[in-house]
Amino acid sequence: MTQQKTVLVAPMNWGLGHATRLVPVIELLLSRKVNVLLAADKRPYDFLKYRFPDCEIIRLPGYEPYYPEKGSMAFNMLLTFPYMLAKARKAKKLLKEIINRHGIDLIISDNRYELSSNETYCVFITHQLSVQTFGWQRLFQPLITRLIYRHIKKFDELWIPDYKDRQRNLSGRLSHIKTFPIENYHFTGPLSRFNPDDKIKVNEETGLLVILSGPEPQRTVFEQLITKQLLQSKIKATVLQGKPGEYKTRNKKNITCISHADDRQMATLIKSAEIVLSRPGYSTIMDLSVFGKKAIFVPTPGQTEQIYLAREVKKRGYCYFEEQASFNMVRAIEMSKKYAGLPQLTKNKKLDDLVGKLLSRIQDTPSE
């Protein structure tokens, strides 16, 4: 009798996006009857623990960036580089213990560069193969790329959550590059926690939906800005606060605040909304594309990836965006009417094929 294989799935702890986009990967693994062990920390840990209650989950701390209220995120990361290395070494040591204790046959790491091992087959998921920099930060782009590629080369396989097609893709030059760090790379198609085939009931009363996400303090800074402008404008809105572990709803004049929603509730809120206001995190863009939504994007200050993505979707005529420092909600809602909305996704068949091939590979490998 063939012994059941164990797969370790671990997302980066920067916000929820890296965890939420692993949902379809985890679901496919579970449907193939493998043992899935989840490893995360902070809000991703809370999300995955609630979303997959039958899976064992362990805490695996990692570096989580501190987004300054002012100044450059890139400069802040340079200052904290020694701290990042210390966290990575600690996680690497913990990974070795996890592999030995649980008999890990496969690792799937979403943007956790340190989670590679010579003891088992390793897959790395990322859409950030070309980190975007602006102004003086461009001086550091070659160095950043070399550092990133050095870590990716330690993995056996690279998965890119986007379409290979340059015309249909969502990530632009973040993922579509001339030379890839390893030869064994695959475009999985966009990854979203939502299934395009699910029948979602629409609530006709929903107007503006605000989705808050990302690390502190910028998540709270953004929430305070949005709340103030909503109260001043009296625009009716639902604010999804992005706090897994809390399930509270409260009303404040024209605002309904929901601390966290499960996938089904969130899908209903998104599909029902006339327009969505959020950060342009890549996972959020993939989620909104499932429904072909119109959106207003406000990038996290200093977060160059979000700035690039916001500019890209605006250039393509999909969605409007404004910088946080000059954000005006009434103006943004009016301007957003000129944009077509994100292209709607179809069911992802490529991912199913990749998971099947991956599991065939490890099934052919005898367990220790």
Image (tube, rainbow, N blue to C red):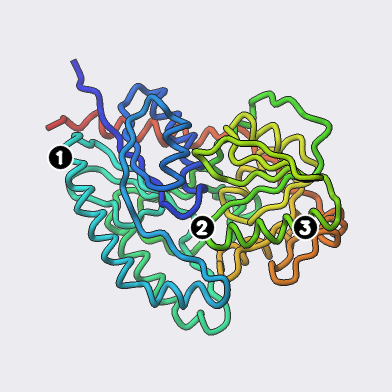
Disc 2 residue type?
Pro
Residue 100: give its label: 1
How far is disc 3 from disc 2 in space, using C-alphas? 28 Å
Q: Which mark is residue 236?
A: none
Q: Secondary structure at mark 3?
A: loop
**Disc 3 or 2, which lies upstream in sequence?**
2
Label 3 crowd bin: few (<14), some (14–19), many (20+), radius 10 Å: some
CA gap, disc 1 to disc 2? Answer: 32 Å
Location of residue 357 by image quarter: top left
Quarter placement of the C terminus? top left
Is 280 on the left or on the right of 231, as rendered?
left
Q: Earlier in the sequence, mark 1 or mark 2?
A: 1
Disc 3 vs disc 2: which is toward the camera?
2
Towards the viewer: 286 or 269 = 269
Give the amino acid at mark 3.
Gly
The residue at which mark 3 appears reads as 317
Label 2 sits on residue: 215
> Which residue is the extreme one toward the top?
1
Q: Give the secondary structure at mark 1.
A: helix
Circle 2: is it few (<14), some (14-19), or many (20+) Cα within 10 Å? some
Which residue does the image show at 29% across and 52% down from the upper left? 115
Residue 113 image position (x, y, % from top left)? 34, 57
Query: The N terminus lies in which quarter of the figure?
Result: top left
Query: What amino acid is labelled 1 in the image?
Result: Asn
Relative image position of residue 216 (x, y in whole percent): 52, 59
Helix, strand or loop for disc 2: loop
Picture residue at 44% right of the left edge, 79% below the top? 140
In this view, the residue in front, 201 or 265, is 265
- Which residue is painted at 23% across and 36% down in the image? 105
